[in-house]
Amino acid sequence: MRLRLFLDSADPQAWSQWLPSGLFHGITTNPTLLKQAGQPCRLEHLRQLSQQALDLGCRELHLQAWGGDAASYLSCGRQLASLALGPIVVKLPVTRAGTTAARALIADDVPVTFTACYEVPQVLIAAALGAAYIAPYLGRISDQGRDGQAELVGMQRSLDGLGSSVRLLVASVRQPADLGRLAAEGLSTFTISPAIAAGLFGCEATAADALRFEADAGFATS
């Protein structure tokens, strides 16, 4: 699969900074990120945010449904999907209630991302239902004392073995080096914070060479 990066943020200022770079396919967010960014988790406000994302060239906006039970997840998911034409992907936890709602949404041609994935067998749920994505939490898996890198490689191999089109959307990335290690194992889809995005440009040797090129061209910078 071709590399696909998402910006994991609910801050429109971060969107404005990073989406014009062309690096990001879209945006992932959830109620926790909305709270951290001081953005109300309300449908009408999310409609405004969705329009901002679209105006900035976002090709997919992943929004987390809430409600706690299958009926509430389904109702919220349908409302989220109607906020904008085309680019809304509804996020649901990979629980019994979340998968029940997901089945109905997928039947209605609403793309779904399963979230809060921690174990290899959970990707089979996404494959069975035909979800667009499933998001394992790399850093949080490692926090449990497990080898997060190895767990995610196992998830990808399971999907590959099935010939599934589900994308493993790697979340909870703690350092830029994680991207390279997992990409070498065939993982191609990541959601990263603005801080990790900045870290991709953090090579001091590259910065020093760029300054030297400018100086040698007669355009010394301070």
Image: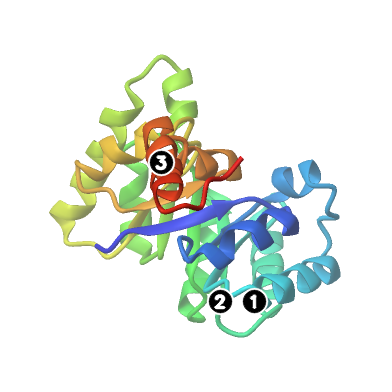
Residue reaching furthest left? Answer: 161
- What residue appears at the point 57 percent right and 71 percent down from the top-left corner? 58
Please give the residue where the numbered disc 1 appears in the rendered image: 54
Measured as percent of width and height from the top left, residue 185 is found at 19, 41
For this view, does 7 lie left or right of residue 186? right
Give the amino acid at mark 3. Arg
Between discs 3 and 1, the one toward the N terminus:
1
* Mark-to-mark CA distance, 3 and 1: 38 Å
Circle 3 residues within 10 Å: few <14, some 14–19, many ≥20: some
Circle 1 residues within 10 Å: few <14, some 14–19, many ≥20: some
- Residue nearer the viewer, 43 or 3: 3
In this picture, is 142 found above or below 98? above
- What residue appears at the point 81 percent right and 56 percent down from the top-left corner? 41
Please give the residue where the numbered disc 3 appears in the rendered image: 212
State the scheme by which the image is colored. rainbow
- What residue appears at the point 76 percent right and 68 percent down from the top-left corner? 49
Q: Which mark is residue 87?
A: 2
Q: Are marks 3 and 1 in contact (CB under 8 Å)?
A: no
In this picture, is 111 found above or below 96? below
Measured as percent of width and height from the top left, residue 32 is found at 72, 43
Mark 3 vs mark 1: in front = 3
